[in-house]
Amino acid sequence: MKNKALLLSLFGLIAVLIGAAFLYNQLSPSLAPEQLSTQMPSTQPPSASSTEAPVTDTPIPTEEPPVSTAPATDATEPSSTEPPLAPDFTVYDRDGLAHKLSDYRGRPVVLNFWASWCGPCQSEMPDFDAAYKELGEEIHFLMVNMTDGSRETSESASQFIDNSGYSFPVFYDTDYEAATAYSVYSLPTTYFLDAEGHGIAQATGAINAETLQRGIDMIYNANE
């Protein structure tokens, strides 16, 4: 009888552990921390002395900006709540033509930094391509490749895009100007800019379709 009771208890414990593991796997995505942050990069121009691409494939978590403890101002005084203007930069298309970020003002912009060797970048690209096919007439999608000339070239990046069948516009950051301006030290990194060029939100690391849509909604509603 004791052995039978022991076996029943053991089986019960195993069942509990299996159930707990199942619930963890089902619930853990919904418990993931919010990826979108309203903290944006400085508008200072990139340093001319930068000679290396400041990116790795190791995600660096973003931090929410600290809560201000400054005393409240008089209600009659104008207060500036306008988000920062996103840093401008120049990148190049497949034909070598230069494109500035400021050229795309007038419509919201989804700005994504990626590389073909980056696994997390690859995982989110189908969602970006689907969003581009649906919203490409209303939103600019700028997929900026970190083109260092060795680990990633414009040829290898273009071949990856062609083989994958993606249709979104791709640009090449051959001078590291964009990566430096936005302090991109991990891939992928995504910025959401409103139609006037203000930085509204950013996400570090791969994002899913839901988070991408949430960022898009933010820049749609930014100027209302």
Image (cartoon, rainbow, N blue to C red):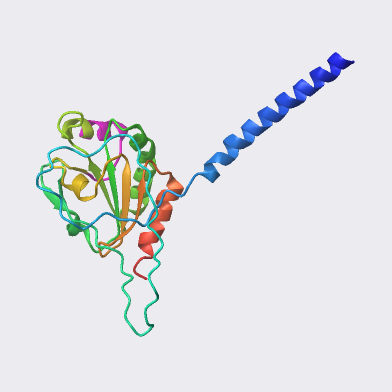
The answer to whether residue 90 is left or right of residue 216 is left
The answer to whether residue 94 is left or right of residue 118 is left
Q: Position of residue 21 (x, y in %)?
A: 62, 31
Snapshot quadrant of residue 189? top left
Residue 105, placed above or below residue 32: below
Q: How many discs mark residues in the rendered view?
A: 0
The answer to whether residue 30 is left or right of residue 165 is right
Task: Report the residue at 16% width, 52% height from top.
Answer: 89
Snapshot quadrant of residue 195? bottom left
Residue furthest right as drawn: 1
Q: Position of residue 114 (x, y in %)?
A: 28, 39
Residue 102, placed above or below residue 14: below
- Based on the picture, tell me whether residue 71 belongs to the magenta stretch: no
- Based on the picture, tell me whether residue 159 belongs to the magenta stretch: yes
Q: Position of residue 81 (x, y in %)?
A: 33, 70
Task: Report the residue at 21% width, 34% height from top.
Answer: 158
Task: Report the residue at 36% width, 65% height from top.
Answer: 222
Residue nearest the viewer, comparing 152 with 28:
28
Residue nearest the viewer, comparing 108 with 72:
72
Which quarter of the figure is the C terminus placed in?
bottom left
Q: What stretch is highlighted in magenta?
A: 158-170
Snapshot quadrant of residue 105? bottom left
Residue 59, placed above or below residue 6: below
Q: Position of residue 9 (x, y in %)?
A: 79, 23
